[in-house]
Amino acid sequence: MNFTVMVWRQEGPKKQGRMETHKVSGITEDTSFLEMLDILNEELIEKGEEPIAFDHDCREGICGACSLHINGVAHGPENTTTCQLHMRSFDDGDTIVIEPFRARAFPVIKDLVVDRSGFERIIEAGGYVSVGTGGAPDANALPIAKDEAEEAFDAAACIGCGACVAACKNASAMLFTSAKVSQFTHLPQGEPERHQRVVNMVKAMDDAGFGNCTNYQECEAVCPKQISIMNIHTMNREYVKAKLAGTSATA
Amino acid sequence: MLATTSVGRKLVMAVTGIGLFLFVVGHLAGNLLIYAGPDALNAYALKLKEMPYVVWPARLVILSIFLVHIYLGLELYRQNREARPDKYFQEETLRADFASRHMLFTGLMILLFVVYHLLQFTFHAVPPPEHIYTTDLKGKEVTDVYTMVVQGFQTGGVSAIYILAQVFLALHLSHAMTSVFETFGWTATRFRGYIEKVGPIVATVICFGYITIPLAVLTGNLRLPDSVIEQQALEEMETNMIDVMPDPAGRRGDQS
Ligand code: HEM
Ligand code: FES
């Protein structure tokens, strides 16, 4: 397969970037999207040009490191992470537009690599639970209803890739933050910090410069882990409860 | 304050939005009295007028709610634009519907319409109607609201503005009345399908309710009262007579 690739090039943070066009040829349809970029990069290196910088780590769809906004959609045309996307999802001869995730809170570091540490600050603000030290508790000592366990587990599937922010027309991080709030809300372990957690995490989210949710649902549509917007509704409800209980942010 | 965080602002937006929605529903219920005849509508208008201690505080509350809602709407828009300073070269839309993407626009169109509506029917600053009639209601001389409305809508352009405004309101409500459930978290996975239909259904009902009135006037189903038609005929004759009658000095009209 042959493609024309239009890719965002930017030398460094706060530098002026531009779209650059390259031809890639002889790609098999089983090549993954990132392998296609690897092949292109090798050609660039052979020509003595600077290879295209992009994020990746596990290439198994579990770490959330890969990003990329492909043909106008976060993680491209399939509902997966970019590393799980293959060239068979495109047609021979296609022009493929590759951009970094765009948000004020995700500044570009180089080419397609963005700084997603805003997410770390949200987690630091409340994405943890207090546990008693000592021996491991007995299995089933803490009964949890199946429905609750399922919801907590679904929310916990979030890998923090940032596609929700990239897809949201407001660059809002509500899907991510709400998944992290919701996974604890459904579990007794999350009880002690329940009010403080949601208030602090929302504050960290705002401070990082993400936008507001206006219920577009674009986030849910691109999430490679199918995190539901119901988590956002859960978080809103938790936020109201925490505020009614007089909780204010401590961080 | 609550409105200093993203979630807090959306909550205030939703609370004020519900306040405005309740007004929209109440106003529609009042307006529909037009189908019960001139006396019913005029009596309702009179009753409101006779309770200034209720009506004025209510107006002030609605006005402040409206202003807060508009202010936050503009803020929300500004902040959301700032959250993505560098736009995408290519950006697709997968889910967000037309209504959800044009909330500020439809909102501002509603605002424009409200201003026009008040200038026309409350302050009588913008005709039609040129002339506000009074009528006799159980021995009392009262403003003839019924006639005012029918006269207003007999002009096609005016009706068109009202109908268009209701379409903007419907678009706004179709996203808003689903969105409020989500903003308050009054949802659960098993109700999701229903909640997503609430907005569009509510919007359609409200829009239809309001639009029937100009349509009923344009199609002749709501007519001016006979007494007003007679009065108008008389006035017309008088003006025509002034035109054709030679004045005492032997000159015609105002060609002085
Ligand atoms: C009769 C008048 C109006 C009614 C009944 C109304 C109702 C609502 C409601 C219920 C919401 C939903 C809040 C939420 O998302 O949870 C909303 C949102 C909104 N309204 Fe209004 N509104 C009205 C007028 C206006 C006006 C004049 C503006 C102009 C600035 C405006 C701008 C907005 C914006 C920007 C949003 C947020 C949109 C979003 O979240 O996507 N509205 N409105
Ligand atoms: S590289 Fe780990 S999820 Fe894609």
Image (cartoon, coloured by chain):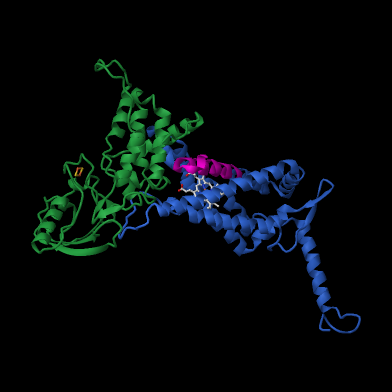
Chain colours: A green, B blue
Residue drawn at (12%, 53%) of the image: A29
Viewed as shown, does residue B30 lie left or right of A250? right
Q: Nearer the viewer, residue A190 or B182?
A: A190
- Vertical position of residue A173 compared to residue B241: above or below: above
Residue A42, given in percent of the width and then of the height, sits at 10, 57
Locate residue A108: give its quadrant.
bottom left
The majority secondary structure of the magenta stretch comes to helix
Residue drawn at (63%, 45%) of the image: B62
- Vertical position of residue A140 compared to residue B81: above or below: above
- Vertical position of residue A95 compared to residue B196: above or below: below
Residue drawn at (29%, 39%) of the image: A226
Residue B172, given in percent of the width and then of the height, sits at 50, 50
Magenta part of the protein: which range? B1-23
**Residue that extends furthest to the front in the rendered view of this protein:** A251
Q: Is residue A17 magenta?
A: no
Residue A22 visible, this orientation = yes
Q: Nearer the viewer, residue B194 or A232?
A: A232
Locate residue B111: give its quadrant.
bottom right
Residue B234, given in percent of the width and then of the height, sits at 81, 65
Q: Nearer the viewer, residue B79 or B242?
A: B79
- In what quadrant of the picture does the C terminus of chain A appear? top left
